Image (tube, grey):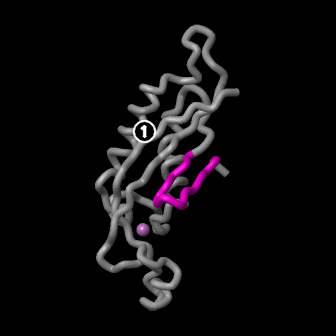
Amino acid sequence: MVYVTRREHFNAAHKLICSQWSEEANQEVFGKCANPNWHGHNYDLWVTVKGTPNPETGFVLNTQVLSKIIKEHIIEKLDHRNLNKDIDLEGLQPSSENLAIWIWNTLKPFISQGELHCIKLQETENIYVEYYGD
Ligand code: NI
Protein backbone atom coordinates (compact mmCIF):
# COMPACT_ATOMS: atom_id res chain seq x y z
CA MET A 1 0.00 0.00 0.00
CA VAL A 2 1.34 3.41 -0.97
CA TYR A 3 0.12 6.72 0.43
CA VAL A 4 0.08 9.66 -1.99
CA THR A 5 -0.47 13.17 -0.70
CA ARG A 6 -1.38 16.35 -2.54
CA ARG A 7 -0.98 19.68 -0.76
CA GLU A 8 -3.19 22.68 -1.45
CA HIS A 9 -3.69 26.07 0.15
CA PHE A 10 -6.56 28.45 0.76
CA ASN A 11 -7.40 31.55 2.80
CA ALA A 12 -10.74 31.95 4.49
CA ALA A 13 -12.57 33.93 7.16
CA HIS A 14 -14.53 32.57 10.06
CA LYS A 15 -15.83 33.23 13.55
CA LEU A 16 -16.34 30.64 16.29
CA ILE A 17 -19.13 31.54 18.67
CA CYS A 18 -21.95 29.92 20.60
CA SER A 19 -24.70 32.51 20.34
CA GLN A 20 -26.35 31.42 23.58
CA TRP A 21 -23.13 31.99 25.56
CA SER A 22 -21.95 35.29 27.04
CA GLU A 23 -19.26 37.27 25.24
CA GLU A 24 -16.87 36.42 28.08
CA ALA A 25 -17.53 32.69 27.75
CA ASN A 26 -17.01 32.84 24.00
CA GLN A 27 -13.74 34.74 24.45
CA GLU A 28 -12.59 32.24 27.05
CA VAL A 29 -13.26 29.16 24.90
CA PHE A 30 -12.59 30.44 21.40
CA GLY A 31 -10.12 33.31 22.05
CA LYS A 32 -9.40 35.44 19.00
CA CYS A 33 -11.52 33.12 16.86
CA ALA A 34 -14.57 34.63 18.63
CA ASN A 35 -13.77 38.21 17.52
CA PRO A 36 -17.14 39.69 16.47
CA ASN A 37 -15.85 41.26 13.25
CA TRP A 38 -14.36 38.09 11.73
CA HIS A 39 -10.75 37.16 11.00
CA GLY A 40 -8.92 34.99 8.51
CA HIS A 41 -6.62 32.00 8.47
CA ASN A 42 -4.14 30.74 5.90
CA TYR A 43 -5.05 27.09 5.65
CA ASP A 44 -2.84 24.32 4.35
CA LEU A 45 -4.61 21.19 3.23
CA TRP A 46 -3.09 17.74 2.66
CA VAL A 47 -5.22 15.13 0.92
CA THR A 48 -3.83 11.58 1.17
CA VAL A 49 -5.03 8.73 -1.03
CA LYS A 50 -3.84 5.15 -0.54
CA GLY A 51 -3.61 2.30 -3.00
CA THR A 52 -1.43 -0.01 -5.04
CA PRO A 53 0.53 1.49 -7.93
CA ASN A 54 -0.96 0.76 -11.34
CA PRO A 55 1.40 -1.64 -13.19
CA GLU A 56 1.40 0.50 -16.36
CA THR A 57 1.56 4.05 -14.95
CA GLY A 58 3.29 3.34 -11.66
CA PHE A 59 0.75 5.69 -10.05
CA VAL A 60 -1.74 5.04 -7.26
CA LEU A 61 -3.68 7.81 -8.93
CA ASN A 62 -2.98 10.65 -11.29
CA THR A 63 -2.04 13.53 -8.98
CA GLN A 64 -2.87 16.08 -11.67
CA VAL A 65 -6.41 14.74 -11.68
CA LEU A 66 -6.46 14.76 -7.86
CA SER A 67 -5.30 18.37 -7.82
CA LYS A 68 -8.04 19.34 -10.29
CA ILE A 69 -10.69 17.59 -8.17
CA ILE A 70 -9.50 19.33 -4.97
CA LYS A 71 -9.41 22.71 -6.68
CA GLU A 72 -12.84 22.32 -8.24
CA HIS A 73 -14.72 20.89 -5.25
CA ILE A 74 -12.83 22.30 -2.25
CA ILE A 75 -10.61 25.27 -3.01
CA GLU A 76 -13.15 27.02 -5.24
CA LYS A 77 -15.71 26.75 -2.44
CA LEU A 78 -13.42 27.79 0.44
CA ASP A 79 -10.76 30.17 -0.85
CA HIS A 80 -11.44 33.81 0.09
CA ARG A 81 -14.81 32.77 1.50
CA ASN A 82 -16.60 33.17 4.79
CA LEU A 83 -16.75 29.68 6.31
CA ASN A 84 -19.73 30.59 8.52
CA LYS A 85 -21.83 31.73 5.56
CA ASP A 86 -20.55 30.30 2.29
CA ILE A 87 -20.60 26.56 2.99
CA ASP A 88 -23.21 24.37 4.62
CA LEU A 89 -21.80 22.86 7.81
CA GLU A 90 -25.31 22.00 8.99
CA GLY A 91 -25.13 24.43 11.88
CA LEU A 92 -21.76 23.21 13.18
CA GLN A 93 -18.88 25.52 14.06
CA PRO A 94 -16.45 26.21 11.21
CA SER A 95 -13.60 24.74 13.26
CA SER A 96 -10.74 22.91 11.58
CA GLU A 97 -12.20 19.67 12.91
CA ASN A 98 -15.58 20.20 11.27
CA LEU A 99 -13.97 21.59 8.16
CA ALA A 100 -11.79 18.47 7.77
CA ILE A 101 -14.90 16.27 8.00
CA TRP A 102 -16.69 18.47 5.45
CA ILE A 103 -13.71 18.26 3.08
CA TRP A 104 -13.60 14.46 3.46
CA ASN A 105 -17.34 14.07 2.77
CA THR A 106 -17.21 16.48 -0.18
CA LEU A 107 -14.15 14.88 -1.80
CA LYS A 108 -14.85 11.20 -1.21
CA PRO A 109 -17.34 10.65 -4.07
CA PHE A 110 -14.84 12.06 -6.56
CA ILE A 111 -11.87 9.82 -5.62
CA SER A 112 -12.16 7.08 -8.22
CA GLN A 113 -8.60 5.73 -8.11
CA GLY A 114 -7.18 4.55 -4.79
CA GLU A 115 -9.01 5.21 -1.55
CA LEU A 116 -9.24 8.45 0.42
CA HIS A 117 -7.07 7.94 3.52
CA CYS A 118 -6.60 11.24 5.35
CA ILE A 119 -7.55 14.89 5.34
CA LYS A 120 -4.98 16.97 7.17
CA LEU A 121 -5.85 20.62 7.71
CA GLN A 122 -3.50 23.15 9.24
CA GLU A 123 -5.04 26.37 10.56
CA THR A 124 -2.06 27.90 12.37
CA GLU A 125 1.65 27.23 12.45
CA ASN A 126 1.26 25.06 15.55
CA ILE A 127 -2.10 23.36 15.13
CA TYR A 128 -3.41 20.89 12.59
CA VAL A 129 -6.15 18.29 12.54
CA GLU A 130 -6.33 14.94 10.74
CA TYR A 131 -9.46 13.04 9.77
CA TYR A 132 -9.45 9.42 8.63
CA GLY A 133 -13.15 9.02 7.94
CA ASP A 134 -14.33 7.66 11.27
NI1 NI B 1 -9.98 31.43 13.81
* Residue 75 % position (x, y): 37, 45
Left or right of residue 101: residue 72: left
Q: Main secondary structure of the magenta part?
A: strand
Q: Which residues are magenta?
A: 119-132
Does the closest atom of ligand 1 sit within 8 Å of the Cβ of label 1? no
Q: Nearer the viewer, residue 111 or 68?
A: 68
Instruction: Name the residue at 66% across, 22% down.
Output: 52
Q: Position of residue 94 (x, y in %)?
A: 45, 64
Q: Relative to residue 96, is residue 107 depicted above or below?
A: above
Q: Residue at x 55, y 49 (%)?
A: 120
Count of labels in the image: 1
Decide if residue 67 is on the left or right side of residue 53.
left
Left or right: residue 53 compared with residue 18: right
Q: Is residue 89 above or below residue 25?
A: above
Q: Height in image: 50 above or below 97?
A: above
| Residue 131 in picture, x, y percent from top left | 61, 51
Dot 1: few (<14), some (14–19), or many (≥20) neighbours within 10 Å? many
The quarter of the rendered structure image containing the N terminus is top right
Say which quarter of the image contains residue 67.
top left
Q: Looking at the image, which residue is at 51% across and 85% down? A: 28
Give the residue type that dot 1 points to.
Ile
| The stretch drawn in magenta includes residue 122 | yes
Q: Residue furthest top?
A: 56
Ligand 1 shows up in the quarter that is: bottom left
Q: Secondary structure at mark 1?
A: helix
Residue 26, position as x, y percentages in the image: 47, 84
109 or 67: nearer the eye? 67
Which residue is identified by label 1?
70
2, above or below 118, in the image: above
Give the residue furthest to the front.
125
Q: Residue at x 48, y 88 (%)?
A: 21
Q: Is-magenta flag for residue 41?
A: no
